[in-house]
Image (spheres, rainbow, N blue to C red):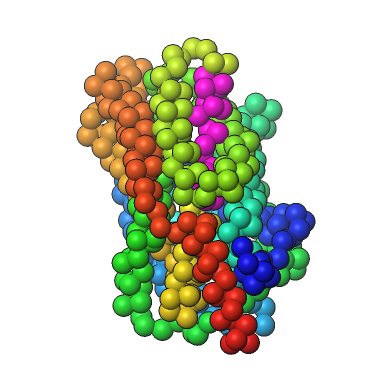
Amino acid sequence: MSSVAAADAPRRSNAVLAAFSGPCLPLAAFGVALPVTLPEFYATHVGMEMGMVAAVFMAVRVIDILFDPFIGWGMDKTKTRFGRYRPWMAVSTPILMLSALMMFVLVQPGAGPAYLFAWLLVLYLGFSIGTLGQLGWAAVLAPQYDQRSRVYGWWQVFNIIGVILILILPTVVVKSGIGDYADGVRIMGWAILIALPVTIGLAMIAVPEPVNVGAPPHGGPKAYLALFRMKTVRKLLIADLLLGIAPGITGSLLFFFFGQIKGYDHSQAGLFMLIYFMAGLVGAPIWAWLATRIGKDRALAVASLIFSVFYVGATLVPGGNFALTATAMFIAGLPYAAGLFLLRAMMADAGDEVRLETGVDRTGLMFSILSATTKLGHVFALLPYALLPLAGFKALPGPEGNSEFSLLILQVLFIAVPGLLLAATAWVLKGYPLTPKRHDEIREALALRDAGTA
């Protein structure tokens, strides 16, 4: 890389990246609760009908997807002495604290669909603002190709730590005798509520926010739609959609699969999920390292193929042997983190490409598009909640159990569908145009132009 391009790429200290990544702890707790904990919690402990839970979550997801472009556009238009993205993260904090209180802590058995719809909508609004603000902030924190992988690698490690900590809580509550699983979910809500102001406040104080040189965003809906014509963006969005649906299905059906197919109880299934995410924590540095050797796109394609093979293999391990299943789930989870942080680092790279071509910084808008496809993937991941009742499957089957046919459909949805989607991601990434060499050229051109503008 030339000295011009390298000059605009300061290496952030580990302490700064840790402070920046701190808000991932409560945000990741929301991230795992939305597709995994809350649908099952509202279908069983709150007592809402399974199909209704799926319908409400899907409806709110669709509405939330429509929010994202406006939030991204608003972030790109924001200009304050505190930065472009930090004010938005500050705004998200009270919204998320209130929604955590209502969705986890104060909800009572018998709550209706209107309650779930209203507070889920508030939660998703705050979650969108917080996550988009942090992702945009990351893009300007380190603009160089490999350093960007490092920033988003830290981001993902803290995401996984947040997931692990929040998944431990209900199991600890049950095993220690403090309360039942429902009490564990309520304590989960309190933990999120407390962590939000602490972690976001620390990040606001300790982490700088550089500002890209560029004209204010303009062009309205046409500029938004023009992004979809870029080959780079299209491939990223399709890959993100596939990688959103696959683990989303896994999360939404995990307790049913391990409970009714493999014969494990709720706590054991929760431990399998915990082990799976811990493996993602172990694997994240591997994929970040590989991305510096062969490029982010190739590293993600390799990880997706390995993920597909490992995942299907883990689901085929016979039930009854906890240690063997736990080992298989750990191996299956090693590639889990790759797509989550590499796709976001790749979208930040694509934002540089757009800024060079148009002179406009659309980082917030581009991350809002990526966020929308992720959420659309989670919408599709909830389809099994609507399909399983059609096959006669019941969340609480009673002493007679579910039929063999309904259990077969559960296995097809849990094993075959995610495996195929993961493998398809590698195919989608063939011919990805934004190589490391091309990005270095873009950063050099941007550095020269920005220096002239300044």
Q: Position of residue 310 (x, y in %)?
A: 46, 27
Q: Position of residue 87 (x, y in %)?
A: 61, 74
Compare residues 435 and 192 and report the one nearer the observer: 435
Q: Is residue 421 visible?
A: yes
Magenta span has 329? Answer: yes
Quadrant position of residue 405: top left
- Relative to 226, is 16 on the left or the right? right
Q: Is residue 51 visible?
A: no
Compare residues 400 and 130 and report the one nearer the observer: 130
Please tell me whether residue 394 is drawn above or below residue 372 in the rendered image.
above
Q: Position of residue 114 (x, y in %)?
A: 37, 56
Majority secondary structure in the magenta region: helix
Magenta span has 209? Answer: no
Q: In what quadrant of the picture does the N terminus appear?
A: bottom right
Residue at 67% in and 83% down: 81
Q: Position of residue 421 (x, y in %)?
A: 34, 39
Q: Which residues are magenta?
A: 325-342
Quadrant position of residue 258: top left
* Residue found farthest to the front: 2
Quadrant position of residue 233: bottom left
Please tell me whether residue 259 is drawn above or below residue 371 in the rendered image.
above
Residue at 63% in and 87% down: 454
Compare residues 435 and 10 and report the one nearer the observer: 435
